[in-house]
Image (spheres, coloured by chain):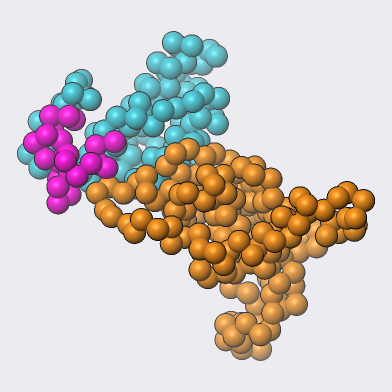
Amino acid sequence: MRWIWIDKFVEFESGRRAVSVKNVSMAEEHVHDNFPGFPMMPECLMIEAMAQTGGILVGEARDFQEKVVLAKISKAVFFDYVVPGDTLRLEACMQSIASEAATTSGRITRADQLIAEIDLMFSHVDQNLAGKKFPEDNFVFTGLFTSLLRDVALNHACPESQKTESGQ
Amino acid sequence: MTMSRDEIFEKVQEVLVDALGVDDDEVTADATLMGDLGAESIDFLDIVFRLEKAFGMKVPREELFPVEGLLNSTDLVSNGRLTDKGLAELRARVPHTDLTEFEKNPDINKLADLFTVNAIVNYVASRLNAA
């Protein structure tokens, strides 16, 4: 996942659920045009953020050995605008996983307000080749994405007594 | 689990409406998954996952869609059509299906048309009865 669109994971239960955070900034140039005078995060990029959250949850469940690609958007419902300055919390829950594919259900919230519900399906692409060839190296999970897991890794290493209220 | 055929059909219908984004009146017993309901290859897995949840049982993909496994082999598929070897394999896997029409033009895109909503209902009914 070379294009990183979420900022970090804050919770990660292997094979079950993952929670990431995305901070929306006026420094992101696309919001200048979407729309002039009313900058807001495009809904398709909320789907991308959920795809990265769910995709890493799916990838980690198979120890990042599979090339996980988004195969299907089963559901995408949006309840409110997202604007620069907002912090989004993206929660993806594993619904099913098999050798060829996995499905996740997801919720995006801002504070406690529900922003979107996004259900996705991912393919383990090497298991669905239909005669096509892909590179042997895993082009999906490159080194960069592991930095997203820095905080959850720290949480595992941090003794209970040293955790703050936010869990950091 | 005891369920009537109508109850099974209703649940299968719900699964297909959710998986394929179609209306429930489109999901008739004779509707073909790919031709009538627009299913693509990834949808077959989605249907398997949803059936597992709906009926609380493990559904081996190759049992429900026995021909799908053919598609991943270059031996059996060439230029989007089943090879002679692929056709022989298909005959072995679906012995009760009339393949006369399909054999005239063994385009893999037509393969899933061999499968209807009824085929899924039959499969689920046989599994539930065997349990």
Residue placed at 44% from the left, 10% from the top? B130
User: In the picture, residue A41 is in which quadrant?
Assistant: bottom right
Magenta region: which residues? B69-90
Foreground of the two, B40 or B66 = B66
Residue A19: horizontal and vertical position, in percent?
A: 70, 55
Q: Residue at 59%, 85% (x, y): give it.
A: A29
Point 50% across, 59% down: residue: A141
Q: Is residue B76 above or below residue B95?
A: below
The N terminus of chain B lies in which quarter of the figure?
Answer: top right
In the rendered view, does B72 fall on the left or right side of A25?
left
* Residue in the foreground of this view, choosing between B79 and A139: A139
Res. B13 in view: no
Question: What residue sits 66% from the left and 89% below the top?
Answer: A37
Q: Is residue B125 above or below residue A152?
A: above
Q: Nearer the viewer, residue A40 or A54?
A: A54
Percent coordinates x, y for residue A40 in the rendering: 65, 77
Where residue A38 sits: x, y (%)? Answer: 66, 84
Query: Magenta stretch containing residue B32, yes or no?
Result: no
Q: Quadrant of residue B99?
A: top left
Tell me if residue B8 can be seen: yes
Q: Colour of chain B?
A: cyan
Q: Is A103 displayed left or right of A125 in the figure? A: right
The chain letter corresponding to orange is A
Say whether residue B85 is magenta: yes
